[in-house]
Every structure is written in C-alpha cells, then in structure tokens.
Image: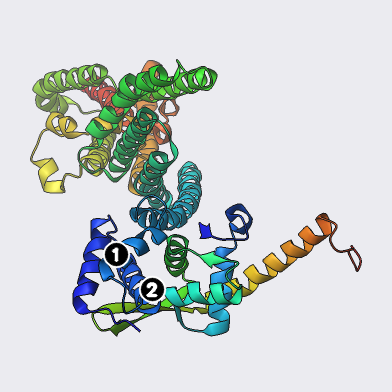
Amino acid sequence: MYICPMYSSELLKGTLKTIVLNLLKDNGRMYGYEITQRVKDLTAEKIQITEGALYPTLHALESQGELQTEEVFIGKRVRKYYTLTEKGQSTAKEKVNELVDFMNTMKFLLDLEPRTGNG
Amino acid sequence: MVRVSDEQVDFILREIEAHGVTIEDLQRNLLDHMCCIIENEMSETDNFDQFFQRLLPRFFSDNLREIQEETELLLTFKHFYAMKKTVNISGLLAAGFTLMGSVLKALHMSGAGASFVLGIIIFSLIFLPLMIALKFRDEGSKTDKLVLSFGFLVGIVTSLGFLFRLMQWPGAGIMMLSGLVAFIFVYVPIYFFSRVRRADLRFNTTVNSVLMMACGGLLFAMYNLGYSTKAEESSQQAYRLLNEEVDKMDQPVIASVNHQDVIALQKQVIKLNREIIDLKSIIIRSSTRLTKSEYSGMTEDQAYGKLPKEEAMSRIMNEPVKSKWGNICKLINQVNGRLAVAYPAQKDLVFEISSIDLESNTTKIALQNLTLIQMHLRLLKLIAS
C-alpha cells in the first residue's frame, strides 16, 4: 500500500483516508500528484503514498460523496482536482478526532504517557 | 523543467490502456500523474523511454491493473453495503406488507389486495434478485453460487405466480406449478446432494432440506387439491334432468290447480327460483368477468364451464351477494310458511336454510348449494301441481 521507509504498511493501514481528507481540508483544491508530494514534504519523506493506494481511495471517496472533482485541461491531458464536499468536511473532522483519540489510547496502552483527567 | 509532448501523452495513455486499465477516469488520473513525475523528476538529458520504463513500476508491485482492481474492490465494497441494506429493508417491507395483507383479508377490510401485491412485488422483484447478486459475491464455491441462485430464481417465479393469481392475470397457474415442481423436484434434491457430503454442512443441509421439502410439499398438495368437478357436474346434470321432466308436465298441471294456498305456494316458489337464478348470475359473472349479455347468451352449463378452476378456493361474499342471499333466506322462510299452510302434513318438505352457510362457502360450493335449493323448489313445484 505505502512505500514507507520508516513505518510498516500494517501500521499505516486505515489512515490513508484520514490523511487525504485532512490534506484537502487544509489545502482546498488538490490533484493526485500534488497530494503525494505534499505528504512526502510534510513528513520529511517518512511517509510516501503510492499511486496504487491513492487513486482507488480517491475514487472510493468520490463515489461516497465525500469529494467533488473539477477537470482542467492541460494541453492534451486532463487534470482532476479534488475538493471536499460538505459531507467530506465533517467526515474529515470525525476521522481526525478518531485518529487522535486512538493515538492517545495507544500512548496510554503502551505506557508512554501517564493518563491525566478522570480516566 | 521538461515538457511532455502530445505524442508522449498519447504514448503514455496507450501504455496505460495496454496494461489493462480500462476505467477512463483512472486512466486520466494516472496519465496526469505520470506526466507530473516526468515533468518534475526527469532531467533534460534523460531518455524519455528509459525514464518511463523506470517510472512505470512505481505504480504497482505486479502490474498496473492492480490499481483498477483495487478501485473496483473499493467501489463494489460500498455497493455491497448498500445492497445488504436494501436487502434488509426490502425484506422487512415485503414481510410487513404480506402480514398486513393477511390481517386485512382476515378482517374483510379493504386494502388487503394492494398490500399483498406490494409485498409480493418487493419480495420477488427486489429482495430475491438482490439475494442472488449477494450470494454470487459471498459464496466461495461455484456450485453453491449456482444452486442458491437457481433456488432464488425458482422463488421469484413462484411468488410472481402468486401475484398473477391474486391479480387474476393469465399464466398464474403455470408459473406457480412450474415454480413448485422445480423447487421440490429439482432445487431441493440438488441443494441436498451438493452439500450433504461436506461434513461441516451436513446437519444444516439435512434440516434445511427436510424443512424445504415439507413446506414445498404442503404447498404442492394444496395446489393439487383442486376442487372435484365431478360432484358439481352430477348435481348440475340431476337438476337439468329434473327440470326437463317437470317442464314437460308443468303447464297443463298448473292450470288445473285451484286451491288458493297451493297457488300462493307456487307463486312464492317461482319468485324464489328467480331470485336464486339472479344470485347465481351475480356470482358466476363476478368470477368469470362475463357481461350480462354474454352471460344471458349462454346456458348455465356453459357459464359454469367458464369458471376459473381456482374459484374452487375463493370466497364469494360481497355486498350484492350478501343482500341477495338475505332476500333468498327471507323468501325460503316464506315458502316454508306457505308449505306448512298448504301441506301441513308434509313436514319433510320444509327446507332448512340454516343447513347452508353461504358466507363461508367457496364460489363453486355456493353455486352447488344454490342448485340444491333449486332442486328442492322443483320438487315443491311438482308436488304443488
């Protein structure tokens, strides 16, 4: 799924949708290549999304109504820009919250950080 | 920065197609992505063909078609959930409508037919076809897929047969019969023998097969419990013969009778007979959909012949029949009264109307009972002459 010099693909499975949705939330309109490059830059090449994983996810999100597209002709080829729909906006928030909660739970589970609050 | 020429764009697109990617949307995405990589990562001195050959494997581990397969999988996965949801909803709706139809029918309330029709349509045209599609996706073994799909197909034909019967559309009988025969004699044996050899499925298969055979057998037995036309024919024939005999002697004999009570009885008998003929006409016409003129243009025997076979199973009571039957009951009591006055000694000739429960009779039984009353009236007329 991922070409990832640092993390195993098992570790990252299930986060691709969250990554894509959150990137689009922050950047508005993006196309496929741009998404892969942004992830690579932001993570200092620790996470690299492969095309084989990105496009099926983009198509699935589009068919679920999370994304809308806009096509722009560049010479003879067509570039497809993706933006979040309203549904996509709320899904992006949900996914990020879910992931943050999961990471906090993992930190506690692995005893990396003492739990604070009522827990 | 290198610019990808139109010829190179065409070349890349051809390569993408040649590698088995057929979804146009995906082709465009991949084309643009490859062009972006070339434009950003290829140096002026690089050879395009060599660079492209190095670039291509970045998109897959075995071949480029993987991306399309992954896309299709994700898309059908979504449809799969939608289908399962639709199966659940349509199953509940079909069951609900059928149940509501049964309750309404039992309470003689309106809307029963519409509920049944909706229930059966949802069941046979939405629920069962979706089940076939789901089984084709779910089941691992090809035999299981085919056997279960065949079963659902038989279910569709049989339930549509029920719908056709309810709507009195042509072809209901053959659909129901062929569906039931295919179910009991083809599907259940195939289901049983294709699964019973597998140890993990043996118990469930045996139980399911017995249940299906029992349910199918009961339905089949009910279907074949056709009303015997022999009894009906013989009572009709007896009535006709009696009629002919009485007709021969009727006219001269009636003229010779003078006694007032007997004449009153005869008049009452004739009136009652007319009412019964009218009621028979109403019942037969409503079952055969014959017009009044069509009905009057044929003999009673011919009209009987037009009655659909399944009328042996359906009830006849509706408002016109009910009011006519009420009239007839009153007239029979009057005839019994006249009979008691005219022939006080002939107590055997009193007709016990309580012996006939027309409301619970099926069409053919009701007609037979009416013929029975007519035969009795003929006898009275004969005696009164």
Closest to the observer, B195 or B349: B195
Closest to the observer, A53 or B219: A53
User: Badge 1 local density, few (<14 within 10 Å), some, or many (20+)?
Assistant: few
For the C terminus of chain B, which image quadrant? top left
Indicate whether A13 appears above or below A64: above
Task: Return the residue at label 2.
Answer: B37
Q: Which one is closest to the eye, mark 1 or mark 2?
A: 1
Q: Chain of mark 1?
A: B
Evaluate whether residue B241 shows in this view. Answer: yes
**Amino acid identity at mark 2:** Ile
Quarter of the figure with residue B378: top left
Question: x, y percentage for residue A34?
Answer: 46, 77
Task: Return the residue at label 1.
Answer: B50
Residue at the spot 51% in from the left edge and 65% down from the top edge: A49
Give the SS element for disc 1: helix
Q: Chain of mark 2?
A: B
Question: x, y percentage for residue A32?
Answer: 43, 73
Task: Say whether mark 2 and mark 1 are on the same chain.
Answer: yes
Q: CA distance from mark 1 to mark 2?
A: 14 Å
Indicate whether B233 appears above or below B293: above
Quarter of the figure with residue B326: top left
**Amino acid identity at mark 1:** Gln
Question: Which is nearer the N-term, disc 1 or disc 2?
Answer: 2
Residue at the spot 32% in from the left edge and 67% down from the top edge: B51
Indicate whether A11 appears above or below B257: below
For the N terminus of chain B, which image quadrant? bottom left
Left or right relative to B208: residue B154: left
Quarter of the figure with residue B227: top left
Question: x, y percentage for residue B204?
Answer: 53, 22
